[in-house]
Each structure stands twice: as C-alpha cells, then as structure tokens.
Image (cartoon, rainbow, N blue to C red):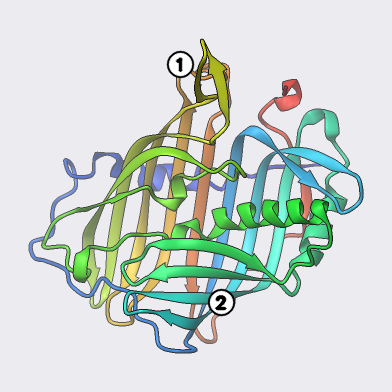
Amino acid sequence: MTSIRPLWSGYIRAIAVLICLGVCLPLPAQATTGLVWNWTPDQARRYFVQTQVRLPEPMLFLALANRDVRVTEFQVNLNLNCVAANALGKKAWELSCAIDDFAIQAAPISTEKGRLIDILNEYDEMLTNAHLELVLTLDGRVRTVDLEGIDKRNKRSDIIHENLRLILARSVAGFDLRLPKKGDDRGGPWRQTNAQIAGFPSELGSMGAVEIDHLVQSSTNTVHELAMTGRGTMSSGEMIVVGNQERPRNLFEMAISGTAQFDGAAGELVSREYLVDAKPTASSMDSTGTGVNYVQAAHIVLVKEGQQVPAFDENAELEDTTNAGKVR
C-alpha cells in the first residue's frame, strides 16, 4: 500500500505567519476596489483543485455491489471546467462545472486493507460524465453544491451519489471566499462567517460557527494577494443524549489559515491555498489527546488558456495514519 503524502505539510510553514492577522500584518495604505466576481453568459473558467481531508471519524465508502469500506483519509485531484449557465438575478450565477479529470486516493481503516481500490475505481468511472452545479454569488459565497449526471437506480446508488457529492463539496469549498461589500475593502480587513471550508463531509450536515478575517496584503497590477485566518467551533451534526439532553457527539475547535490571489480586473479567483486544523474539545466523546484531528488542506489554481495542468496520480489505496482500527 502507498503511504499518504500529507498535502498540508507543505502549507504549514508558508501560512504560519498568518496566525497573527490584524496584529502582525500591516494594513494596506489605501483601499482596494474591484474585489468582485465577473461572469458573462456561457463564459468558461478552468480550475485545477487538489484537496486532502483527514477525518475524525471514518466515512463509509460503498460499492454498487454489496461491499463497503471505512475510510479515514482521502485526497482528490480535479480538473473542472466551469461555465456560467444561468444568471440568478444580479448577484449570483449558476455554474455548471464539468469534471474533465478526477483521481482519488484514500486510506481504509487498518482492518479493511486491500478492499478499497475497486471502490475508488468505480467512483472514478461513475464521475466520467458527471458535473457539479454551483451557485456562486458575485461577492464570493458558494450557496449550493449539487452533483448531476450519476445514475441513481436504487437506494444504494442514492447513498453513493450523496457520498460523492460530499467528497466533491470539500474540493469546491475553497471557492467560498467572501469578498468585501461592493468589492471595496476600505483599506482594512473584512469578516466571513459560516464558511464552507469549515464544513464536514457528513450527511448530517455541519453545526456551529466560525469567523474568518480576510485582508489584502499586497497588490501587483490588478492581482491582489489575500491572507486569511479564522477560528470557531464546529460539529459534524451527529448528536448524542446526555442526561436527557441532546448535544453534539464531538465538537472541534478550528484554526483556519491561508492565502489567495484575486484578479480585480478579470473578476476571478487566480489561486487559493488553505489549511483547516480542528481539534476535538475536552467535552467531546473523542477528546483532546485521544481523538483524531479533523484536517483539510486545499490548493486551487486557475488554468489559463494554453496552460497544462499537473499529471494526476492513479487512484490508490493509502496507508492509514490515524490508527482508526478501534472505531466503534
């Protein structure tokens, strides 16, 4: 089996300095304007997206046949071709994003080694003619993520479809980068709440709140360098009853940091990298010191006309690094 190569390890040194946003980073001398998406009907943009997720609780990967495997980590590579399909009023667009290429590597729990690769290849095949539908506001909020083009013939395939949607939602979460009101930062930071990057790949949804502060660090011509840092407490939505009261099974204290480039003249995201590191709280069932951190790392790059995207690795089963063989 292949050992997992943590995507986040390359980000930690580069973005550690952002933890002190608002204290250590100097504010720009003047306001930055033009921080707003610009789409025209049928306009297309291509993006290369790489995402890696370490799960606090194993996620069930199902095959169409009666087989399933519990997974503790996964990494997805995507080539997306997003077209502006429908204007939703004056403030949002529905984007149809064809999945031009897809590759997935994932780690099963230690007791289920050797059973996952066929499922990963099956998922790859299922996504051959699939596409994502996103609703993206002009100020950078991703409102919905839907997966279309997959045959849903029975209840099991419905579950697989939703699992794939949740996996791919982690990949496109990075497009949810709130921009300042009317595209003008007024020379200072602005705040985003309830960001998609803080979510869990859970059919139960995500609960809690995060606050992320964004800041324009510098500008080169029309391309603006953004920094972000944030904190909050989130839950995957799973509930338990304690003393006749319902509460989340696990709560996670999230630390979020990252960078982005936005082209104000073109009205487009040029790139984004971020790291989400979430530790279970002391009151969680999987408490600090005994549980597994929920970690996400992502890299998004706009692919210009004529540019080549990196070659994808083959789908692969990876080695579990979370010691999750003890799962309930």
Furthest-left residue in this view = 29
Q: Is residue 26 left or right of residue 312?
A: left
- Residue 309 in sight here: no
Between 247 and 54, the one nearer to me in the picture: 247
Tell me, for residue 222, which label it has, or none.
Answer: none
Q: Amino acid at mark 1?
A: Ala
The quadrant in which residue 227 appears is bottom left
Between 106 and 40, the one nearer to me in the picture: 40
Q: Which residue is mark 1?
A: 282
Tell which tag, 2 or 1, sits nearer the viewer: 2
- Dot 1 lies on which element? loop
Q: Amino acid at mark 2?
A: Ser
Q: Which residue is depicted at the point 66% across and 46% down? A: 74
x and y, in percent, of residue 102 in the image: 69, 65
Furthest-top residue in this view = 243
Q: CA distance from mark 2 to mark 1?
A: 42 Å
Q: Which residue is depicted at the point 38% across and 42% down? A: 256
Mark 2 residue crowding within 10 angstroms, few (<14) / some (14–19) / many (20+): many
- Residue 36 in sight here: yes
Between 294 and 67, the one nearer to me in the picture: 67
Tell me, for residue 96, which label it has, or none.
Answer: 2
Q: Is residue 40 left or right of residue 214?
A: right
- Dot 2 lies on which element? strand
x and y, in percent, of residue 327 in the image: 72, 24
Q: Which residue is depicted at the point 18% across and 53% down? A: 189
Q: How many marks?
A: 2
x and y, in percent, of residue 280 in the image: 49, 25
Mark 1 residue crowding within 10 angstroms, few (<14) / some (14–19) / many (20+): some
x and y, in percent, of residue 112 in the image: 84, 33
Q: Which residue is depicted at the point 22% across and 60% down? A: 216
